[in-house]
Image: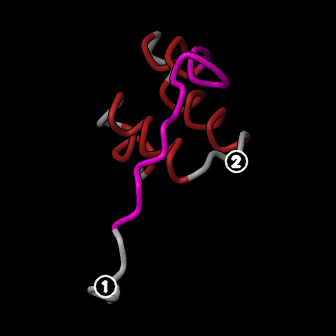
Amino acid sequence: MADKNEAPAEPVAVDTQAGIFPKFCKLWNGGEHRNAINLANAEKLSEAEWAALHVEFPRIVAVINQ
C-alpha cells in the first residue's frame, strides 16, 4: 500500500503521433490486431505507452488475452 504522504505519480505524456503508434494504428485499423500486438511487444513499450494504446484501443486487452 502506498504511503498516504506520498505524492501521486504525475501522468507521463506519450506522443501517439510518433514511434510505433502510426504503424500500430494502421495495422489495428486494418483489422490486423495480432500483428499490431506483435509490433508493440517487439518494441518493448513502457507502461505509459501501453496505457496510451489502451486508451486509444480499448479492445487491446481482449486481443492480448486471446
Quadrant where the image shows the N terminus: bottom left
What residue is disc 2 on? 44
Q: Magenta segment, which residues?
A: 8-23
Closer to the camera in the image, 2 or 43? 2
Real-space CA distance between mark 1 and mark 2, rounded to the nearest whole angstrom: 32 Å
What residue is disc 1 on? 5
Residue in the picture at 33% in, 88% down: 3
Name the amino acid type tagged 2. Lys
Could you tell me residue 6's position as x and y percent? Answer: 36, 80
Report helix, strand or loop for mark 2: loop
Closer to the camera in the image, 27 or 10? 10
Q: Is 2 covered by the magenta stretch?
A: no
- Please count the marks in the image: 2
Could you tell me residue 20's position as x and y percent? Answer: 65, 25
Mark 1: give few (<14), some (14-19) or many (20+) Cα within 10 Å. few
Residue 12 vs residue 36: left or right?
left
Could you tell me residue 24's position as x and y percent? Answer: 56, 22
Q: Are marks 1 and 2 in contact (CB under 8 Å)?
A: no
Name the amino acid type tagged 1. Asn
Residue in the picture at 70% in, 47% down: 44
Q: Is 19 covered by the magenta stretch?
A: yes
Determine whether 65 is above or below 50 in the image. below
Report helix, strand or loop for mark 1: loop
Residue in the picture at 57% in, 15% down: 22
Residue 15 vs residue 42: left or right?
left
Q: Earlier in the sequence, mark 1 or mark 2?
A: 1
